[in-house]
Image (cartoon, helix red, strand yellow):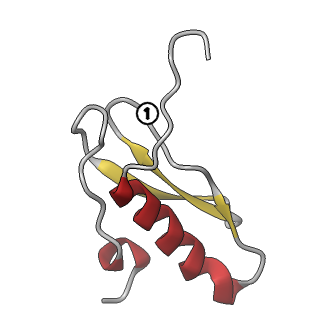
Amino acid sequence: MDTIHEKYRLQDCPFCGGPGLLEEEHGWCWYAVCLDCGAQTAAFEYRKPEDREAAAETAAQLWNLGKVMRGGIGD
């Protein structure tokens, strides 16, 4: 497996059943987000390139455990 996205598969969203996506934010953190309802994990920061994959793995693991936040109207 050559990419982080191929290595860490996400389960469906625990809120709406929509697809999850592992997202990198401008080279400093990873988080998982639902493409349908916007639920997401916390962002996991990395400072060194060698810590990049560990941050992605943490976000994916928490998503798959259902440790996900979802904002409501007005949040």
x, y percent for residue 39: 44, 36
What residue is at 24 percent from the left and 39 percent from the top? 18
Residue 10 is situated, as x and y percent measured from the top left of the image, at 30, 60
Q: How many labels does the image show?
A: 1
12 relative to 56, above or below: above
Residue 74 occupies which quadrant of the picture? Answer: top right
Q: What residue type is labelled 1?
A: Gly
Tell me what residue is drawn at x 52 percent, y 49 percent. 41
Quadrant (top left, top right, bottom left, bottom right) of the C terminus: top right
What is the quadrant of residue 27 in the picture? bottom right
Which residue carries the number 1 mark? 38
Q: Is residue 27 left or right of residue 23?
A: right
In the image, 16 versus 66, the foreground residue is 66
Percent x, y of residue 4: 42, 77
Q: Residue 4 or 11: which is nearer the viewer?
A: 11
Residue pictured at 30% horizontal, 89% vertical: 1
Above or below, 13 against 45 in this view is above
- Residue at 21% x, 38% y is 17
Residue 50 higher or lower than 59, as above or below: below
Q: Is mark 1 on a helix, strand or loop?
A: loop
Q: Residues within 10 Å of mark 1 (few under 14, many from 20)?
A: some
Q: Left or right: where does residue 39 sit relative to residue 14?
A: right
Q: Where is residue 59 in the image (x, y as percent from the top left)?
A: 50, 62
| 48 up-or-down from 38: above or below | below
Please, which residue is most extreme toward the top here?
74
